[in-house]
Image: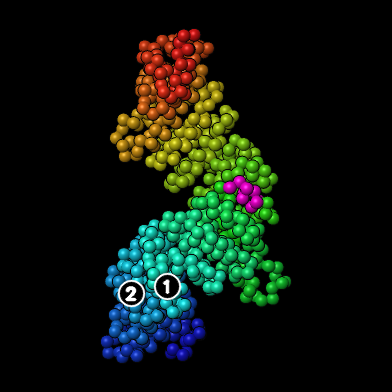
Amino acid sequence: MKNAVIGNNKQKANLIVLGAVPRLLYLLQQETSSTELKTECAVVLGSLAMGTENNVKSLLDCHIIPALLQGLLSPDLKFIEACLRCLRTIFTSPVTPEELLYTDATVIPHLMALLSRSRYTQEYICQIFSHCCKGPDHQTILFNHGAVQNIAHLLTSVSYKVRMQALKCFSVLAFENPQVSMTLVNVLVDGELLPQIFVKMLQRDKPIEMQLTSAKCLTYMCRAGAIRTDDNCIVLKTLPCLVRMCSKERLLEERVEGAETLAYLIEPDVELQRIASITDHLIAMLADYFKYPSSVSAITDIKRLDHDLKHAHELRQAAFKLYASLGANDEDIRKKIIETENMMDRIVTGLSESSVKVRLAAVRCLHSLSRSVQQLRTSFQDHAVWKPLMKVLQNAPDEILVVASSMLCNLLLEFSPSKEPILESGAVELLCGLTQSENPALRVNGIWALMNMAFQAEQKIKADILRSLSTEQLFRLLSDSDLNVLMKTLGLLRNLLSTRPHIDKIMSTHGKQIMQAVTLILEGEHNIEVKEQGLANFLQRARQTLCILANIADGTTAKELIMTNDDILQKIKYYMGHSHVKLQLAAMFCISNLIWNEEEGSQERQDKLRDMGIVDILHKLSQSPDSNLCDKAKMALQQYLA
C-alpha cells in the first residue's frame, strides 16, 4: 500500500474509497499490533494526508487525530516520529481546525516533553505549533507551557529545518503579543540574546526564507513595544533587509511577504517611514508590483503564467499596503507616491477589483494619501476619486466600509473640491445610514463625515442632514456608549448651529429637543457614571456642549430658549465658577452673547443675569490669573457699563 500511494493522488483516493482508513487506524491502535506494523500504518496514513484536501477531510472524519495523539504515548521513537509526521501534514492543511490541538489539555505539555527526543520531533512539533498558533489564546497556552524556553535553544541546532521551524514558531508567538515579545528580548541562547541571534539570521549570506522570518520576528517584537523603533537592529538591519525583499530579483512570494512585513513595521512610526522611502528607491521599486503578469506572448511557460496570475493580485495588495504605510504622515512622501507612474489610475482601478483584499488595500492607500490638503485639491480632483469611492461604499463588507467612510470624511472637508459632487450623489442618506450601524467605527465615521459636511454649509444642506438623520437618531447618538460617537455628534450640532439665520431656523423647529439634549449632557458631572468614565471625557463633552449653547445664544430669536430656561442658566453660572479654565471660557462666551448691548432685549437679559449673581462672578473672573479669562470677563463687564 505504501509504495502504491506515494505521489499518486488517484491511488490515494481509491484506497480511501475502499475503506482503508478505518482499517489502518484499527491496526494502529491495536495493542496486539507490533510496533513495526503500527509505524507502517502511520506512514501510509501520512502519505494519504499528503494528497488532496478531500483526503484530509476523510481522515478527519475517521477521527485520526485522537488516534495519532494516543500513539505519541508509545515508548518507540520511530513510531512517535511517524505519528508526528502524519499530524504535521494534517495540521498544516487548511481544512483542519487548529482547535483540535487544544481540546485535550495534556497534549501541549506532552509535545513539549517530546521536543528533546530527536531532530525530527523538534522539526515536526515546531511546525505543528507555528501552524496551530492563531491568536492570543493559543499564544498564551503555548507560552504558559514553556514554549519560549523549550524552543529557544533549537535556533542553534545543526539542522537547518529545525532552526527554520523554531524561527517560524517565534514569529507567530510574538505577533501582536507584548507579553511574549518582552520575554523574548531577554532570552539568552549560548550566551547571546535572542534579538542578536535574529540579526545574525538576517544577513545576506543566509537563505532568503531565514532572512525574511527573522525580520518578521524583529518586526513583531518592535510593534509589540519590546524593541524601540530607533534601535539599530530595526533601523540598520531589519528595515534594509525587508526593502531588499521587495526588489525585482526576489521571487513573487518573497516580494509579497517583504512588502507586507515592511508595511506593518513602519505603519506607526514617521521616522521609519522616511528612512524606508529613501532606501533603495523603494517607491519606484514598488511600481513594478503592478506589472504582473507580463504580456502573455513573452511567457511560453503556461505554469509560470498561472503562477504569475495567482500572485499578481497579492503583489498589488502588498504594494498598496506599503504605499499606505509610507504615506501615512509625511507630505513629501505622499507627493512622491502620487507622482509615481500612473499611480492614481492604478489605485482607482484597484477600487473595483474582484478581490476584496486588493480593494481594501487600495482604499487604505487612498485614505492615507487623502490626508494631504494639496492632493485633495489636485490629484484627487483630476481623477474624480469620489466616484469609485461612492461605488465602493454601496454594500461593501464592513472592513472596507470602515476605511472608505474614513476617507469620505477627508473628501468632505470644506476645502475639498469633491465635496459638492459627493453631496449631489446622495451622500447624506448613505452617511445617516452608517450612523445606525452596529459597528461603532462606522457610526463614528458616519457622524464625522456629516459633521465635516455641515461645516460652513448652506441652510439647505443642514436641513437635509437634520431631516435624514431624524431627531430620534440624534438623541440615540448623544447617548451612545462610544465617547467618539458622542463627541462627533456634539461637533455636528455645533456645526449645524452656526451663522445666525441658521441657528434661529433650526432652533425654531428643533429647539425643545436640542435644549433637552444639552441639559442632559451638562448634568453629567453630577452623575455617578462620570467617576467611572473619567473626568477628562466629561470635560470634553461639557466644553463642546457649552460651545453649542454659546452658538444658540448668538441667535436672534434662539437666545430666548436659553433665557426662559432657568435650569440652563444655572448650569452656565455653575460652569463660570468651575475649576477648569476651558469650561469657564466656554461659559463666558454664552454670557457675552446673551448680554451683548447692540441687540434687542439686551437690557432685560442683563437685568435677569445680574439678579442671578452673574455680575459678581464677572468681577471675580476679571481678577483671574488666566489672561484670556480675565480679558473676556472685563469685556463682559463693559457691556453692563455701556
Q: Is residue 334 magenta?
A: yes
Q: Is residue 471 magenta?
A: no
- The residue located at (53%, 37%) in the rendering is 450
Label 2: which residue?
111
Say which amino acid is labelled 2. Leu
Label 1 CA crowd tier, 10 Å (few <14, some 14–19, many 20+)? many
Label 1: which residue?
155
Magenta residues?
Answer: 330-338
**165 or 524, nearer to the observer:** 165
x, y percent for residue 561: 43, 20
- Left or right: residue 223 versus residue 530 is right
What is the quadrant of residue 119 in the picture?
A: bottom left
What is the quadrant of residue 155 in the picture?
A: bottom left
| Among numbered discs 1 and 2, the one appearing first in the sequence | 2
Q: Is residue 73 above or below residue 363?
A: below
Q: Which mark is residue 16?
A: none
**233 or 305, nearer to the observer:** 233
User: The residue tagged with tag 2: helix, strand or loop?
Assistant: helix
Q: Is residue 445 above or below residue 132?
A: above
Give the CA distance from mark 1 to mark 2: 18 Å
- The residue located at (38%, 62%) in the rendering is 186
Q: Is residue 286 above or below residue 513?
A: below
User: The residue tagged with tag 1: helix, strand or loop?
Assistant: helix
In this orientation, does residue 579 appear?
Answer: yes
- Picture quarter with the N terminus: bottom left
Say which amino acid is labelled 1. Leu
Q: Is residue 597 above or below residue 322?
A: above
Label 2 CA crowd tier, 10 Å (few <14, some 14–19, many 20+)? many
- The secondary structure that dominates the magenta segment is helix
In this orientation, does residue 390 appear?
Answer: no
- The residue located at (44%, 83%) in the rendering is 47
x, y percent for residue 96: 41, 71
